[in-house]
Image (spheres, rainbow, N blue to C red):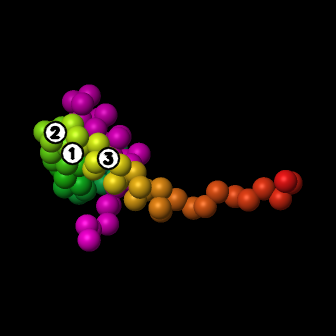
Amino acid sequence: MAPKQKATPAQRRAVCKLMDAGCTYKDCAEIVFGSRRFYGRVERILAQRKRLRAMPEEEFWKQFAAETAKLEAMAPPAPVSRNA
């Protein structure tokens, strides 16, 4: 079983956007996670992005589908309408 992710999908996207804009690891960590000491998270997010970009397209989409399924399983159930 894979370890629990410490960053939300939104935080991961923010890291990628900031780094693409030229932000340093420590500045990015402070902006996204609230402290410069979390720069290791930024490094790991970027390493994963690099691995994903390097894999064949078919493998990428398999992993994307698996990650999406995990996130959907964690989502709370949709509210039930009582006005039906």
Q: What is the crowding at mark 2: few (fewer than 14 residues within 10 Å), some, or many (at least 20)?
A: few
Q: Secondary structure at mark 3?
A: helix
Q: Which residue in the structure is indicated by mark 2?
A: 56
Q: Determine which of the numbered discs, if any, sits on residue 64 in the image.
A: 3
* Picture coordinates of residue 17, whole percent (x, y): 31, 34
* Picture coordinates of residue 18, whole percent (x, y): 29, 35
Is residue 50 left or right of 7 when viewed as pictured? left
Is residue 47 left or right of 36 when viewed as pictured? left
Residue 34 appearing in the image:
no
Q: Which residue range is magenta in the image?
A: 1-29
Q: What is the crowding at mark 1: few (fewer than 14 residues within 10 Å), some, or many (at least 20)?
A: few
Q: Which residue in the structure is indicated by mark 1?
A: 59
* Picture coordinates of residue 1, whole percent (x, y): 26, 71
Asked if residue 21 is among those painted magenta in the image, a careful observer would answer yes
Asked if residue 24 is among those painted magenta in the image, a careful observer would answer yes
Of 27 and 6, which appears nearest the observer?
6
Numbered disc in front, either 3 or 1:
1
Type of amino acid at the residue the image marks with label 3 = Phe
Q: Earlier in the sequence, mark 3 or mark 2?
A: 2
Question: Image point 47% across, 62% down: which residue?
Answer: 74
Q: Secondary structure at mark 2?
A: loop
Question: Image point 24% across, 30% down: which residue?
Answer: 20
Type of amino acid at the residue the image marks with label 1 = Glu
Res 24 quadrant in image = top left
Examine the rendered structure and indicate whether residue 27 appears above or below residue 8: above
